[in-house]
């Protein structure tokens, strides 16, 4: 019996030794923890992966190992507790992907498999097998990017062939047919007609060729090689004169309106300026019949040392689904309403390049069936600035009709300044010092416009706007947001809440007058009685699809799971917890990924929950937490169905 016991002990020792050697020589990192999550085994590969020795990690919680990166400014440490919980849930369920951090804070991606077992004493243990796949993920990302770029280039080439084939064949057919008919002894009247057809067709063909050459010229042009002093007004005046006859042929008026400061010289890329303005005016003429086109030059509101070039028309406008792609080369828009218009799809691509050479960005607003507004802002030279700062903006515009405006701001100084600006513009002003007062006033009186401060204690401007839009006398009047600071994603949320636009402080009288004119003038679109439904859509489907289309299925699924896990953890921690800055920060951190994956309703509720947490509104927190949990479950169900 003693011999058998000794032999069994030796066998166990040999098996243990073999197992230890297998663990130590494994190319994959192996980490073993007890049932409490404390690290007991940590092989050489794991030391290389994380940057810690066995002595440094033995006995520490796995969540501390996973959350080992240093705290650095602007860098959010990974939540080791959440990762550890995810590992426990993933035991014996196959491989998962995780983002971890090394001891120096470097992020890296791993593929992990978790197994559960018992030790020699029958106690539960967890075995983690981790493989660094950072290079593989990067290679896949590069491959996707290269494939996307190749597909984009192929699509551009296909558009080029399709557009140029049509746009060149049509005028060439006109030339050949006209010349052929001239050989058939036509009458003098027919000869004149055929000559005009041939001349017009040749001109159309030449225009297509010149646009392609101009496109190539801008691609090859260096932005610094053609800097010179020129007069923006003079260049614009010549362009308007050149296009005047063509506009008149379409029974369209073409007008140049400018601030006196624009008659001064500026230093810049004259060729790019002429190309941008000329193509914008030409594009407007192509799509405007029996209407008006206005080219405006004036100092950019609230942006010192910049000028704005703006072309507005009352043409056919652009449908919303086409707004993002019309700046692509050889991109044309088809449809019954466009059958009588012809274009190569190059004009706006040329404008985009030209504006970029001047340091600006081309922007667009358009309403289908009503017209479009294109504009860009570019830096001015110092010779122009001295005059520009002293001149009143847009002196040619007549005074606006007097409006009754409700100004909402919790700061007395801000209320006073806005009121004085509005009164000097000839408007009547009423004041409200918080969102609750504003909602009450707007419910009983119809104002012509509301100026709404965004950041106010209690009920903020976004919440007040939602309530005003829900009903009352002023439910459909223009509401302009006013704030000192807002990120691009914040501006999008403001629009979804019902704000027509948002101005960033500081605000000048000229900029305020211009924005009010756009919202209340004869060309302003009539706002919907309810700008945003009380219950926002569950998902921003387009965002979800865009993200899905640029990622591989596994990576996309991992992103979705991580986003939902972050939200779930934040909501779990919020249940029963007192308001705190840390909790608000955790909720804020979960709201970002929710927005990224297109979880629209969940994101909005999380933002409201964050605000309530920061303001110690415990009652609102409980209600919003229930809403967030409901939105979280609905979002998870929607995503699950979408991935089937």
Image (tube, rainbow, N blue to C red):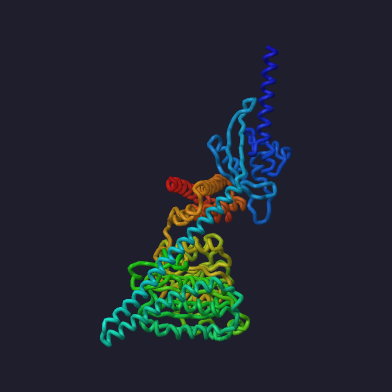
Q: Which residue occupies 65% across, 38% down?
A: 27
Q: Which residue occupies 56% across, 45% down?
A: 569
Please say whether residue 514 is visible from this viewpoint: yes
Q: Which residue occupies 33% across, 83% down?
A: 195
**Where is the C terminus found, in terms of image quarters?**
top left
165 or 370: nearer the viewer: 165
Residue 614 spot, x, y in % from top left: 58, 55
The residue sitting at the top extreme is: 1
120 or 336: nearer the viewer: 336
Residue 472 spot, x, y in % from top left: 41, 64
Please say whether residue 424 is visible from this viewpoint: no
Residue 58 spot, x, y in % from top left: 70, 37
Question: Eyeballing the image, is 480 above or below 13?
Answer: below
The residue sitting at the bottom extreme is: 188
Q: How many numbered circles are shown?
A: 0
236 or 398: nearer the viewer: 236
The residue sitting at the right extreme is: 55
* Quarter location, residue 13: top right
Question: Eyeballing the image, is 102 above or below 349?
Answer: above
**Where is the N terminus found, in terms of image quarters?**
top right
* Quarter location, residue 164: bottom left
Residue 23 spot, x, y in % from top left: 66, 33
Horizontally, residue 619 falls left or right of residue 102, namely left
Question: Eyeballing the image, is 234 above or below 487?
Answer: below
323 or 472: nearer the viewer: 323
């Amino acid at each position: 019996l003693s011999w058998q016991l000794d032999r069994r002990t030796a066998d166990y020792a040999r098996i243990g030794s073999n197992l230890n050697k297998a663990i130590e020589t494994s190319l994959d990192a192996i980490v073993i923890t007890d049932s409490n999550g404390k690290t007991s085994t940590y092989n050489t590969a794991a030391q290389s992966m994380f940057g810690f020795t066995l002595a440094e990690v033995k006995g520490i919680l796995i969540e501390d190992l996973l959350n080992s990166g240093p705290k650095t400014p602007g860098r959010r440490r990974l939540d080791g507790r959440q990762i550890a919980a995810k590992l426990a849930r993933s035991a014996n369920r196959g491989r998962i992907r995780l983002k971890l951090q090394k001891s120096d804070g470097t992020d890296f991606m791993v593929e992990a498999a978790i197994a559960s077992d018992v030790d020699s004493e029958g106690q539960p243990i967890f075995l983690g097998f981790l493989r660094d796949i950072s290079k593989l993920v990067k290679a896949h990302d590069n491959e996707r990017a290269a494939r996307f770029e190749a597909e984009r280039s192929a699509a551009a080439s296909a558009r080029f062939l399709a557009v140029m084939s049509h746009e060149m064949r049509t005028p060439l057919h006109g030339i050949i047919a006209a010349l052929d008919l001239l050989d058939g002894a036509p009458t003098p009247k027919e000869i004149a007609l055929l000559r005009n057809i041939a001349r017009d067709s040749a001109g159309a063909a030449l225009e297509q060729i010149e646009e392609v050459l101009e496109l190539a010229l801008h691609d090859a042009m260096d932005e610094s090689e053609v800097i010179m002093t020129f007069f923006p007004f003079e260049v614009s005046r010549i362009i308007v004169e050149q296009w005047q006859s063509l506009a008149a042929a379409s029974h369209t008026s073409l007008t140049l309106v400018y601030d006196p400061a624009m008659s001064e010289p500026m230093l810049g890329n004259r060729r790019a300026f002429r190309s941008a303005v000329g193509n914008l005016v030409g594009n407007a003429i192509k799509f405007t019949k029996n209407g008006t086109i206005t080219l405006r030059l004036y100092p950019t509101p609230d942006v010192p040392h910049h000028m704005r070039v703006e072309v507005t028309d009352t043409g056919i406008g652009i449908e919303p689904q086409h707004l993002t792609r019309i700046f692509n080369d050889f991109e044309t828009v088809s449809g019954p309403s466009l059958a009588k218009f012809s274009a190569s799809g190059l004009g706006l691509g040329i404008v985009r390049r030209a504006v970029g050479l001047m340091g600006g960005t081309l922007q667009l607003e358009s309403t289908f069936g009503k017209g479009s507004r294109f504009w860009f802002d570019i830096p001015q030279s110092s010779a122009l600035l001295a005059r520009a700062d002293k001149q009143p903006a847009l002196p040619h515009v007549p005074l606006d009709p007097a409006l009754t405006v409700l100004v909402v701001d919790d700061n007395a100084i801000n209320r006073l300044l806005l009121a004085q600006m509005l009164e000097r513009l000839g408007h009547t002003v009423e004041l409200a010092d918080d969102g609750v007062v504003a909602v009450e006033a707007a419910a009983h009186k119809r104002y012509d416009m509301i100026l709404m401060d965004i950041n106010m204690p209690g009920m903020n401007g976004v919440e007040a706007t939602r309530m005003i839009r829900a009903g009352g006398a002023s439910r459909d009047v223009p509401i302009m947001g006013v704030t000192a600071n807002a990120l691009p994603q914040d501006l999008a949320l403001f629009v979804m809440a019902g704000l027509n636009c948002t101005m960033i402080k500081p605000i000048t009288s000229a900029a305020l007058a211009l924005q009010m004119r756009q919202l209340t003038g004869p060309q302003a679109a009539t706002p919907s009685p309810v700008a945003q439904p009380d219950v926002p859509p569950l998902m921003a489907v387009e965002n979800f699809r865009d993200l899905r289309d640029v990622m591989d299925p596994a990576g996309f699924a991992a992103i979705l799971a991580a986003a939902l896990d972050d939200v779930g953890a934040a909501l779990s921690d919020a249940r029963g917890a007192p308001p705190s800055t840390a909790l608000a920060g955790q909720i804020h951190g979960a709201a970002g990924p929710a927005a990224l994956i297109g979880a629209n309703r969940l994101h909005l509720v999380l933002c409201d929950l964050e605000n309530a947490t920061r303001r110690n509104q415990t009652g609102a927190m409980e209600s919003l937490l229930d809403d967030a949990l409901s939105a979280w479950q609905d979002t998870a169900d929607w995503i699950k169905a979408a991935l089937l």
